[in-house]
Amino acid sequence: MDKPLENNPRELETWERVREDYRTRFNGRFGNAGKDWNDYEPGWRYAWQFRSKPEFRHRQWREAEPELERGWLDFAGAAGSWDKVRDSVKSFWEDVSDKVTETVKSQDLTG
């Protein structure tokens, strides 16, 4: 089971609030390609949590990947290898993550 990055319950709660939006985006992008949300969600959640941190918001994939890879084992434990999840993390990071910046900005204004 996934655990919140740095054991921060607020990050988990926040993912729970935006999860369905990302699932909808996933289905729109990959639904006809036979890909399963359950295979991608852990990677998207992980990427979302990192992308929500100020120091990662504007990083390109090639800059962030080494730190993401190092942190994956702590995040997922025995749930899967980096090689298994890398593509889902990358797809989120490069194609979907603009929504993260919008969500974080909104929280900063209301939070």
Image: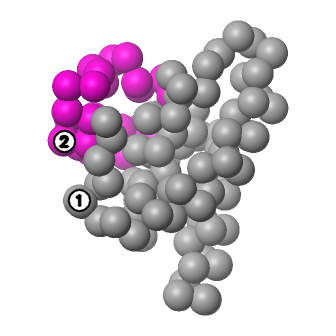
Instruction: Point out which mark residue 6 bears.
Output: 1
Is label 2 in a helix, a strand or a loop? helix
Q: Is residue 77 left or right of residue 34?
A: left
Give the tally of numbered discs.
2
| Magenta part of the chain | 61-88
Most foreground residue, 44 or 54: 44
Look at 57% across and 79% down and name the residue there: 107
Look at the picture and state if 32 lies above or below 89. above
Quadrant hosting residue 69? top left
Residue 32 can be seen, yes or no = yes
The disc labelled 1 sits on which kind of residue? Glu
Q: CA distance from mark 2 to mark 1?
A: 9 Å
Most foreground residue, 63 or 81: 81
Instruction: Point out which mark residue 74 bears.
Output: 2
Residue 20 is one of the magenta-drawn residues: no
Residue 66 can be seen, yes or no = no
The disc labelled 2 sits on which kind of residue? Asp
